[in-house]
Image (cartoon, rainbow, N blue to C red):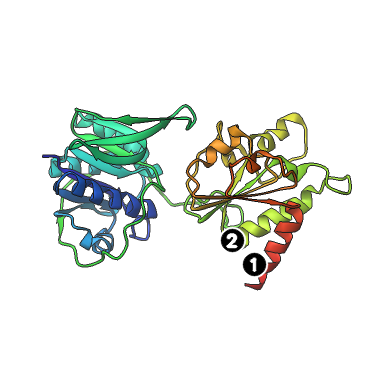
């Protein structure tokens, strides 16, 4: 019988990341689909007691912990040592892990240490004919594959937005501490320098993805471009809504073509065939044409809306749930005004 280990780390405040609650829900369902396969929860952090209690009622058979100041920060050597210790202690055949930036870099090395295999960017975990299988996308999210592996242990790094977060399962967890000697390391974490709130535009956990297209920098109805006003409208909306900002390729590439660009936009914001494929409950595209290379990045957005002056644009061809044929400048100005009143 398969043995499942759900493995995650805590945030700096001791809580679980949202993606961890999502993937835990997937691990719990996987355990049920495998006929009640044993499920253990493995936690890494400075102090994991509160995190364990927050999911104590998830149905896990055991709660394992590697805790201490050395394991409270993101560092490959300590993260890998902690994950390896938990994997060996649990004797798990399936290790289900949320694909945070911290564990995405450490888990492949752990799989090698325990002679296992690893798959990343997993978008579904299910059971077919009594065997676990995963779903993964290829070729810029245009092809989907279902994969099975015989090698164990099998480490499965699951992307965010795949499962609904597990809620309402708090209680009192009985933690078993797994001893690990902190490995020798040359890396010292002296602090975290985060971007100012108004400067941060990429928010993976935001409820809404707001995408700006090249139309924001083009000539408007009066025959003149209004880039400063566009910047003010977009940043104002992001600040009020706490949405995540995306962009089409044409907009982020304009700087290389000598055209006027939005000062806060970079290739990090690019969504689509040559950019990212985010997962948000809702998406709003403005001044985008909705062509296939861009829209492919919206594959996992659950509700898609667009604002465009062209009623025949790509969004109108079944690629958006709702298309508003209107001027994005006017629409977002009114939206910001309404948000300011709220």
Decide: is 154 above or below 69. Answer: above
**Farthest residue, direction left:** 1
Across and down, in percent, residue 319 comes to: 58, 42
Decide: is 162 above or below 259. Answer: below
Residue drawn at the location 50% of the way across and 56% of the way down: 207
Q: Quadrant of the N terminus?
A: top left
Q: Secondary structure at mark 2?
A: helix
Residue drawn at the location 24% of the way across and 64% of the way down: 53
Q: Quadrant of the C terminus?
A: bottom right
Across and down, in percent, residue 194 comes to: 51, 52
Q: Taking the image as drawn, is residue 78 in sight?
A: no
Q: Which mark is residue 230?
A: none
Report the residue marked by disc 2.
Answer: 241
Across and down, in percent, residue 196 comes to: 57, 55
Tell me how many marks there are.
Answer: 2
Residue drawn at the location 21% of the way across and 51% of the way down: 41
Report the residue marked by disc 1.
Answer: 339
Alpha carbon separation for disc pair 1 and 2 = 8 Å
Residue drawn at the location 71% of the way across and 40% of the way down: 312
Q: Is residue 228 left or right of residue 268?
A: right
């Amino acid at each position: 019988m398969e043995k499942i280990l759900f493995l995650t780390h805590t945030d700096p405040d001791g809580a679980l990341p949202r993606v961890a609650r999502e993937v835990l829900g997937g691990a719990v369902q996987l355990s049920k689909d495998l006929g009640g396969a044993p499920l253990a929860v493995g936690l890494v952090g400075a102090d994991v007691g509160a995190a364990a209690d927050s999911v104590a009622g998830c149905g896990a058979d055991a709660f394992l912990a590697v805790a201490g100041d050395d394991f409270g920060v993101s560092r490959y050597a300590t993260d890998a040592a902690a994950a390896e210790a938990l994997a060996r202690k649990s004797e798990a055949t399936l290790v289900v892990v949320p694909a945070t930036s911290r564990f995405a870099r450490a888990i492949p090395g752990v799989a090698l240490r325990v002679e296992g295999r690893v798959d990343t960017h997993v978008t579904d975990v299910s059971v077919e004919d009594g065997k676990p299988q995963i779903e993964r996308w290829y070729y810029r999210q245009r092809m989907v594959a279902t994969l099975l592996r015989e090698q164990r242990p099998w480490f499965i790094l699951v992307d965010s937005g795949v499962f609904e977060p597990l809620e309402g399962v708090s209680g009192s967890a009985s933690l078993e501490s797994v001893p690990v000697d902190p490995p020798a390391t040359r890396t010292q974490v002296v602090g975290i320098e985060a971007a100012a709130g108004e400067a941060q535009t990429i928010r993976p956990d935001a409820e809404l993805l707001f995408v700006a297209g090249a139309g924001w920098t083009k000539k408007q109805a009066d025959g003149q471009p209004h880039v400063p006003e566009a910047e003010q409208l977009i940043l104002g909306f992001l600040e009020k809504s706490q949405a995540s900002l995306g962009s089409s390729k044409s907009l982020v590439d304009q700087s290389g073509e000598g055209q006027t660009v939005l000062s806060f936009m970079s290739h990090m914001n690019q969504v689509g065939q040559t950019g990212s494929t985010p997962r948000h409950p809702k998406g709003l595209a403005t001044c985008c044409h909705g062509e296939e290379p861009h829209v492919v990045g919206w594959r996992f957005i659950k509700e898609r809306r667009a604002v465009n002056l062209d009623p025949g644009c790509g969004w109108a061809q079944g690629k958006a749930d709702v298309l508003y044929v209107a001027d994005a400048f006017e629409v977002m100005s009114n939206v910001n005004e309404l948000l300011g009143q709220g």
